[in-house]
Image (cartoon, grey):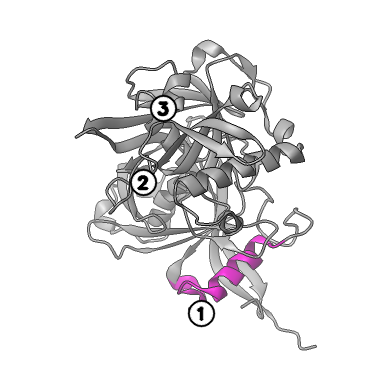
C-alpha cells in the first residue's frame, strides 16, 4: 500500500478550567478543514485519537475522558463588537463523530487567553499591564462570553495564586461572564423549554422523577439525588464503574432530551451525547473530595454531581455550572430547593473535586424568568505549543 507522510498543523495544547484541548487558529488548518464537514471531523478525531475501542487515546492527544477529548477553532470575529469567534468540537471517545451541539464552559477560559496569544485581538485592546477584556462569540450556541484576562508586560499572565478545585496547581484568575446564557431570546426558545420550573419526568424502566429542565449555559436535566438512590456525595469511581447506573442516567437523559424538544426520537440521543447534560442535586452534607480533602456541609449551599458524555465528571463542566447558578437563582427549581430556597445571586456548590462558586442575575419579566448573565472564575495555561501531526491520508 502507498505510504503517506504525516502533515503538521500549528496547534496549541491548553488547559482551560478543569478541561484541556487542542486549539487551532482557523487560518492554520488545512484548506479542506477550514469549513465545517467530514474533513474537519476526521482531522479532529485523528488528532484526539478517536474512535478508540481501547478507550485510552494512546495514539492521539486526547486523555480518554470527556474533559480531555476536545478541539477548538478560533478566528477573528465575524460578529460586530466581538474580538474572536470560538468554535468547539467535543470528540466522541469510542464512536466516530464530533459533537458540535454545545459549548465547553471550561475551555471558554482558554479561548479568551488563546485569542491574545494567537494575535487575534486588536493590539489597541491589550493593556501593557492590567486586564484585557476579550469579547468572545461562542459560535456553537451563538452567545457572547466576556473573558477578563490578566496581562503582564503585554503578555497573558498565566501564573498566579488562584486555586480551582479539580486543577492540581494554582494559576492566574480569569473571570468569565456568560451573557444572556439562556435560550429565552430565541424565537420560541425558553429558559424552561417545558414551561415549568419542575416537571414530572416519566423515564421508561425507572418511573416518574421530579426534574428541572433548563437551557442556560447548556441544556441540563436536574433530578434529586435521593430520588435515584444517591446522596450527592458520590465520586467518579462509584458511578463510572457501575454499568447499570450509567444506563439509568442515559435513560433519564434521553427522556429529558425528548421532553425539552432537543431530539424527536430516542435513537437521536446517540448522536447528541454532549447535550443535554444530566445532573443530580442534594442539600449540603460533609464529604471527602477526590483529593482526600474534607468538604464541610457548612461551606457549601448544595451538592451537585453531573455527567458528561455518559460518565460522571471529575469536577464540574463550566456550562453546567452556569445552569446550576441560573437555576439556583430562580425560586422553586430543584437546584434552588436543594440550596434552601429563596432568592439568591450566587451559590457555592460541592462537586467531586471540591467546591465552585457561580453567580447569576435572574429576574422575572411579565411572569417569565430571564437571566442577564452568569459569572464564575476559572484559569487557563498553555501546556505545549508547536505542531500536531496526523497521517496525510486522514481526510
Q: Which label sits in the foreground, 1 or 3?
A: 3
Residue 204's x, y, as percent? 63, 41
Q: Is 33 displayed left or right of 249 in the figure? A: left
Q: Are marks 1 and 2 in contact (CB under 8 Å)?
A: no
Work out which residue is located at the far top of the displayed protein and give it: 298
Residue 260's x, y, as percent? 45, 46
Q: Secondary structure at mark 1?
A: helix
Residue 215's x, y, as percent? 40, 43
Work out which residue is located at the far bottom of the displayed protein and give it: 2
Density class for disc 2 (Cα within 10 Å; few <14, some 14-19, many ≥20) is few
Does 211 sit above or below residue 186? Answer: above
- Tell me the quarter of the image containing the N terminus: bottom right
Q: What residue would you read off at disc 2?
A: 153
Q: Secondary structure at mark 2?
A: loop
Q: What residue would you read off at disc 3?
A: 333
Density class for disc 1 (Cα within 10 Å; few <14, some 14-19, many ≥20) is few
| 131, 264: nearer the viewer | 264
Tell me which residue sits at (61%, 34%) in the image.
207
Tell me which residue sits at (43%, 30%) in the image.
198
Q: Is 279 displayed left or right of 54 in the figure? A: left
Question: Label 2 vs label 3: CA separation?
Answer: 46 Å
Mark with earlier residue (1, 3): 1
Density class for disc 3 (Cα within 10 Å; few <14, some 14-19, many ≥20) is many
Tell me which residue sits at (50%, 38%) in the image.
221
The count of marks equals 3
Magenta stretch?
27-51
Q: Is 298 displayed left or right of 45 in the figure? A: left
Q: Secondary structure at mark 3?
A: loop
Q: What residue would you read off at disc 1?
A: 32
Q: Is 46 inside the magenta-drawn segment?
A: yes
Amino acid at each position: 500500500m502507498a505510504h503517506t507522510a504525516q502533515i503538521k498543523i500549528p496547534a496549541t495544547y491548553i488547559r482551560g478550567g478543569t478541561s484541556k484541548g487542542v486549539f487551532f487558529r482557523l487560518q492554520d488548518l488545512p484548506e479542506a478543514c477550514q469549513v465545517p464537514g467530514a474533513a474537519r471531523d476526521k482531522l479532529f478525531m485523528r488528532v484526539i485519537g478517536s474512535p478508540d475501542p481501547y478507550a485510552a487515546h494512546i495514539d492521539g492527544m486526547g486523555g480518554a475522558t470527556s474533559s480531555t477529548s476536545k478541539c477548538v477553532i478560533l478566528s477573528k470575529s465575524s460578529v460586530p463588537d466581538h474580538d474572536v469567534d470560538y468554535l468547539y468540537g467535543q470528540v466522541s471517545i469510542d464512536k466516530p463523530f464530533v459533537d458540535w451541539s454545545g459549548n465547553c464552559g471550561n475551555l471558554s477560559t482558554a479561548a479568551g487567553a488563546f485569542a491574545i496569544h494567537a494575535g487575534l485581538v486588536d493590539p489597541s485592546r491589550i493593556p501593557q499591564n492590567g486586564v484585557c477584556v476579550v469579547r468572545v462569540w461562542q459560535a456553537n450556541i451563538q452567545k457572547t462570553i466576556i473573558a477578563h484576562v490578566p496581562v503582564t508586560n503585554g503578555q497573558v499572565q498565566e501564573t498566579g495564586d488562584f486555586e480551582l478545585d479539580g486543577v492540581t496547581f494554582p494559576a492566574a484568575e480569569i473571570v468569565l461572564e456568560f451573557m444572556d446564557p439562556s435560550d429565552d431570546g430565541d424565537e420560541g426558545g425558553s429558559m424552561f423549554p417545558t414551561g415549568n420550573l419542575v416537571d414530572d419526568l416519566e423515564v421508561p424502566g425507572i418511573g416518574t422523577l421530579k426534574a428541572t429542565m433548563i437551557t442556560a449555559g447548556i441544556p441540563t436535566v436536574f433530578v434529586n439525588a435521593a430520588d435515584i438512590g444517591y446522596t450527592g456525595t458520590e465520586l467518579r469511581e462509584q458511578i463510572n464503574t457501575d454499568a447499570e447506573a450509567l444506563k439509568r442516567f442515559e435513560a433519564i437523559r434521553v427522556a429529558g432530551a425528548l421532553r425539552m424538544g432537543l431530539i424527536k426520537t430516542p435513537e437521536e440521543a446517540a448522536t447528541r451525547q454532549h447535550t443535554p447534560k444530566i445532573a443530580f442535586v442534594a442539600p449540603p452534607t460533609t464529604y471527602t473530595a477526590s483529593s482526600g480533602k474534607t468538604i464541610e456541609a457548612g461551606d457549601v449551599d448544595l451538592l451537585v454531581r453531573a455527567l458528561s458524555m455518559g460518565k460522571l465528571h471529575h469536577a464540574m463542566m463550566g456550562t453546567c455550572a452556569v445552569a446550576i447558578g441560573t437555576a439556583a437563582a430562580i425560586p422553586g427549581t430543584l437546584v434552588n430547593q436543594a440550596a434552601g430556597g429563596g432568592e439568591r445571586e450566587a451559590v457555592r456548590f460541592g462537586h467531586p473535586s471540591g467546591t465552585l462558586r457561580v453567580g447569576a442575575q435572574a429576574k422575572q419579566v411579565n411572569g417569565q424568568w430571564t437571566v442577564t448573565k452568569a459569572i464564575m472564575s476559572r484559569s487557563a495555561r498553555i501546556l505545549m505549543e508547536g505542531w500536531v501531526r496526523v497521517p496525510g491520508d486522514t481526510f
